[in-house]
Image (cartoon, rainbow, N blue to C red):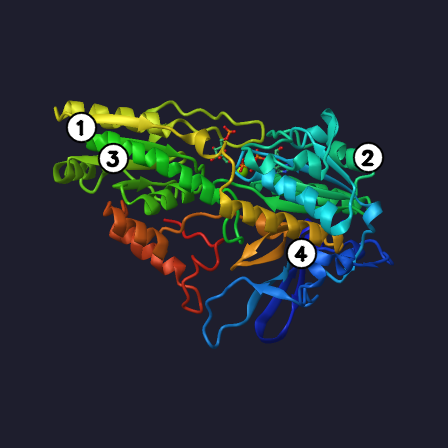
Amino acid sequence: MGNPRDTQTKLVPGAAGFVLEDVPHLTDYIPDLPSYSNPLQDNPAYSVVKQYFVNVDDTVTQKIVVHKDSPRGVHFRRAGPRQKVYFESDEVHACIVTCGGLCPGLNTVIREIVCGLHDMYGVRKILGIDGGYRGFYAKNTVTLTPKVVNDIHKRGGTILGTSRGGHDKSKIVDSIQDRGINQVYIIGGDGTQKGAAVIYEEIRRRGLKVAVAGIPKTIDNDIPVIDKSFGFDTAVEEAQRAINSAHVEAESTENGIGLVKLMGRYSGFIAMYATLASRDVDCCLIPESPFYLEGSGGLYEFIEKRLKENGHMVIVIAEGAGQDLLSESLQSTDQQDASGNKLLQDVGLWMSDKIKEHFAKKKMLITLKYIDPTYMIRAIPSNASDNVYCTLLAHSAVHGAMAGYTGFTVGPVNGRHAYIPFPRINEKQNKVVITDRMWARLLSSTNQPSFLNPRDIADAKKEKQPATGLLDGENCKDKKVSS
Ligand SMILES: Nc1ncnc2c1ncn2[C@@H]1O[C@H](COP(=O)(O)OP(=O)(O)OP(=O)(O)O)[C@@H](O)[C@H]1O
Ligand SMILES: O=P(O)(O)OC[C@H]1O[C@](O)(CO)[C@@H](O)[C@@H]1O
Ligand SMILES: [Mg+2]
């Protein structure tokens, strides 16, 4: 077997620089697979829709802002129901698994996969895998029916349970094979999608008629290519409550400081959007934007200035921000979670101690209140718009698997749902690009220092200029500019 990239991505060139980064199909390795007409044709809810089926040639462009001479560029296969399907309804035996940390909307995705398979395709055999990847071989399964999942979208968490670690390729695929499962829906973050790619490869190596569909879940919004991950909006909304409390506390005392720590291990999107939404935040610190404490242009100087101007201030810090500073002053630990993710030290507590220590030394009276709503923003049910988004993700995944596509993650690209090959999702993380306009908007709204020296800014700008002269950050989310 060659390089996984070759079996997971098919590059199909077209006119004027068009490239389709296609996803695998079961017929790529199982010849003469019979197809059937899509049962949706006879479904009263859908048959009234004009052009309900997606044209087989429909694609979604990765870049939406172009110049008149730009090449057409990378495209992905458009998600949606096809006229032809490669599974008969009573043949399908699907399973669903959730892995990694919690995220608002997990239960909605589970519900809508079950109801989508049942109501649109007449599928009756759907299993829930208990407790993440290791549940395939170490736990019992749960039978999922529309009745079982009817109300679950109103609850936070995942009814299936989740875990980190425990990805044993052979045991998982043995379990899939032994149970006769032929559609695998895998909901999880960057680690989970990597695990899904490995499972797909093994299934293909064994020549099994099993479709593997990934549904991206990450509260940190760190998955590239897709517009935004589900649950992100809900988390940002919930974070407002913590920021509001921090603000009320801060403005009620002289030199009051409200400090809020939000999730974001490597990507500061939650902190950035929560700050932009709130307008009460004076300083937002994220992993992508290094900062320093002491001296001219440093954080202490800014805090002092803001307190003198306003009498109070609110700081939002993402959990992955300032980790370099922490490891300088605390003994660094190399602890990892079961999936191999580095366990971060608590930057919020550290920052709170440092600020108190600094102003005590200066004999300037401050009152600092530290709020850590970490798990509160992800353990809640999804809001209305995330619920609709989760439904579309689930249905897109179901349509893709029924149509015989496999080895794909589903997600919106410039507003249109598409099937994205695993390697594209797995090759890098989505990060806040601090030389893009969104971060500039934040800097201008908080008026905080950029903590960058002019040479760093010039270097980042030089590195960033793409050949077309287009700014990439908002269109091409996987492009990271180092600072
Ligand atoms: N490179 C990899 N290959 C195979 N499996 C992996 C890989 N990375 C992670 N996994 C498996 O994927 C599952 C979830 O990974 P992880 O704990 O990193 O969470 P995640 O999916 O990234 O979600 P999040 O970080 O948003 O909570 C775990 O069971 C882990 O063992
Ligand atoms: O405590 P847990 O469950 O490992 O989750 C914490 C991690 O999960 C994430 O939200 C990613 O899902 C990170 O931001 C955070 O570090
Ligand atoms: Mg992750």
Q: Are marks 4 and 3 in contact (CB under 8 Å)?
A: no
Q: Is mark 4 within 8 Å of ligand 1?
A: no
Q: Is mark 3 within 8 Å of ligand 2?
A: no
Give the Cα distance between marks 3 and 1. Answer: 23 Å
Between 376 and 367, the one lying in front of the other is 376
What amino acid does circle 4 point to?
Thr
Q: Secondary structure at mark 2?
A: helix
Task: Choose mark 2 or mark 3, whichever is in front.
Answer: 2
Of the numbered discs 2 and 4, the one sitting upstream in the chain is 4
Residue 335 lies, with reference to residue 451, above or below; the image says above
Label 2 belongs to which residue?
A: 179
Q: Position of residue 398 (x, y in %)?
A: 69, 50
What amino acid does circle 1 point to?
Thr
> In the displayed structure, does residue 435 sit left or right of residue 412?
left
Instruction: Categorize mark 1 by other alpha carbons within 10 Å: few (<14), some (14-19), many (20+).
Output: some
Q: Position of residue 253 (x, y in %)?
A: 18, 28
Q: Secondary structure at mark 1?
A: loop
What amino acid does circle 3 point to?
Leu
Name which residue lies at 20% across and 42% down.
297
* Res 3 seen here: no
Label 3 belongs to which residue?
A: 293
Of the numbered discs 1 and 2, the one sitting upstream in the chain is 2
Give the Cα distance between marks 2 and 3. Answer: 57 Å
Label 4 belongs to which residue?
A: 9
Res 253 label: 1
Task: Choose mark 1 or mark 2, whichever is in front.
Answer: 1
Q: Are marks 4 and 1 in contact (CB under 8 Å)?
A: no
